[in-house]
Image (cartoon, grey):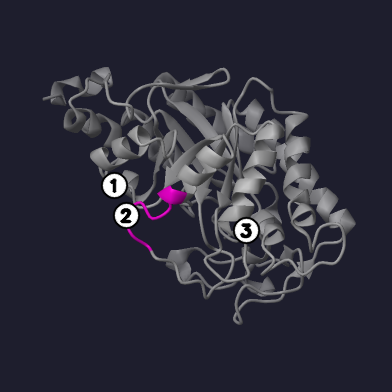
């Protein structure tokens, strides 16, 4: 049996293989509600054999949405459809996870197929917030700097969202601290110009994330996995970097985080990112080995043998598939044949096994 298709147990959750569907925004929600599209979209990955399915960045508050088409979990009524989707995922033997997110200064945009432009207030847009009143780009509006009360609201929003996630039968929570969204904005000195307890030093810049984790842990069962996605580097001189990521990951392990989902970039618009197959895997490897914590590798991982090699070389514990999963929702089923393994197919599909 390949390592890719072998089980991975984290706390009380066992993933039937080490293939995870990475959270990918679908911009197909209205007022934060999941719908039939999300059932079919996420359900297809479960039918395709993935061990873990992480729901797209799901906003913890209305103002935390990247776009007006984002999923949300800021309303008790959101739970009903999410629970239905998760029941289907569970029936297929996969594990349902959710990525809790707040976009900060990168919030309030139209969906990509509606122009992807910043929404003005007369178009249904809203005021954005950030650690400092610094826009992501010159075409964006200047965000409001969060005061202490605003920070406390963000922490509370994540806590309540985690409780709703539990009620919706998610088995894993991932906190989104990457890609230039709110928590990453606090981590990076490129976007965090504060001079109070939440800015300046490394210890101050990570404070919001640690307080969010502490709050989430008061409602999220200790026997269920807790992940954090980070951008391991900003790819810009003077920005957040891999040394800080290793240091943060060591602290997160001590705080009860089980796995670091290792991505990169997103803090500033002018970053030069050397995109290539597996370009972020070295970050996963370094964090895994130096911080002694389980990691997930993501980023242009498209081939079965490529994914298997990452695991065999102990560069990661979990492989996260994104765009390749959109092209090939049956990635896990197809991977088994390529690696010479046997994998359980949905009984409705077994006539197609070769």
Residues drawn in magenta: 275-282
Q: Which mark is residue 181?
A: 3
Q: Quadrant of residue 344?
A: top left
In magenta stretch: residue 238: no
Q: Between disc 1 and disc 2, whose residue precedes?
A: 2
At 62% across and 58% down in the image, what residue appears?
A: 181
Q: What is the CA distance from the residue labelled 3 to the residue labelled 1?
A: 26 Å
Q: Can you say whether 246 is above or below 193 in the image?
A: above
Q: Can you say whether 155 is above or below 337 in the image?
A: below
| Kind of element beneath mark 1 | loop
How many C-alpha atoms fall within 10 Å of the one at disc 3: few (<14), some, or many (≥20)?
many
Asked if the residue under mark 3 is in contact with the one under mark 2, i.e. CB atoms within 8 Å, the reply is no
Where residue 82 appears, x then y in whole percent? 55, 34
Q: Which mark is residue 302?
A: 1
Q: Can you say whether 119 is above or below 302 in the image?
A: below
Asked if the residue under mark 2 is in contact with the one under mark 1, i.e. CB atoms within 8 Å, the reply is yes
Where residue 188 appears, x then y in whole percent? 67, 62
Q: What is the CA distance from the residue labelled 1 to the residue labelled 2?
A: 8 Å
How many C-alpha atoms fall within 10 Å of the one at disc 2: few (<14), some, or many (≥20)?
some
Q: Quadrant of residue 53?
A: top left
In the picture, the quarter occupied by the C terminus is: top left
Disc 2 or disc 3, which is closer to the eye? Answer: 2
Q: Quadrant of residue 287?
A: top right
Horizontally, is 325 left or right of 85 in the view? left
């Amino acid at each position: 049996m390949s390592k890719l298709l072998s089980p991975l147990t984290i706390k009380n959750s066992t993933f039937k293989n080490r293939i995870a569907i990475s959270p990918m925004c679908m911009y197909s929600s209205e007022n934060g509600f999941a719908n039939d599209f999300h059932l079919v979209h996420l359900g297809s990955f479960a039918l395709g054999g993935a061990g873990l399915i992480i729901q797209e960045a799901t906003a913890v508050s209305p103002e935390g949405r990247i776009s007006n088409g984002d999923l949300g979990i800021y309303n008790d009524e959101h739970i009903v459809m999410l629970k239905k989707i998760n029941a289907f995922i569970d029936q297929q033997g996969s594990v349902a996870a959710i990525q809790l997110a707040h976009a900060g200064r990168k919030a309030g945009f139209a969906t990509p197929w509606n122009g992807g432009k910043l929404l003005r207030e007369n178009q249904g847009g809203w005021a954005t917030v950030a650690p400092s009143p610094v826009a992501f780009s010159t075409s964006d509006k200047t965000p409001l700097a969060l005061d202490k009360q605003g920070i406390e609201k963000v922490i509370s929003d994540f806590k309540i969202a985690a409780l709703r996630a539990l009620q919706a039968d998610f088995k894993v929570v991932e906190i989104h601290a990457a890609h230039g969204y709110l928590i990453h904005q606090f981590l990076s000195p490129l976007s965090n110009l504060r001079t109070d307890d939440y800015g300046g030093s490394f210890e101050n810049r990570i404070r919001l994330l640690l307080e969010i984790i502490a709050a989430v842990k008061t409602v999220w069962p200790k026997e269920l996995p807790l992940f954090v996605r980070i951008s391991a580097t900003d790819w810009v001189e003077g920005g957040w970097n891999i040394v800080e990521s290793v240091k943060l990951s060591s602290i997160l392990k001590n705080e009860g985080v089980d796995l670091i989902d290792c991505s990169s970039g997103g803090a500033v618009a002018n970053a030069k990112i050397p995109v290539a197959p597996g370009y972020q895997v070295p970050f996963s490897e370094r964090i895994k080995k130096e911080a002694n914590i389980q990691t997930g590798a993501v980023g242009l991982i498209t081939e079965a043998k490529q994914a298997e090699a990452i695991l065999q070389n102990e560069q990661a514990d979990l492989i996260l598939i994104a765009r390749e999963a959109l092209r090939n929702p049956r990635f896990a089923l197809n991977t088994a044949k390529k690696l010479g393994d046997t994998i359980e197919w949905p009984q409705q599909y077994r006539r197609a096994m070769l």
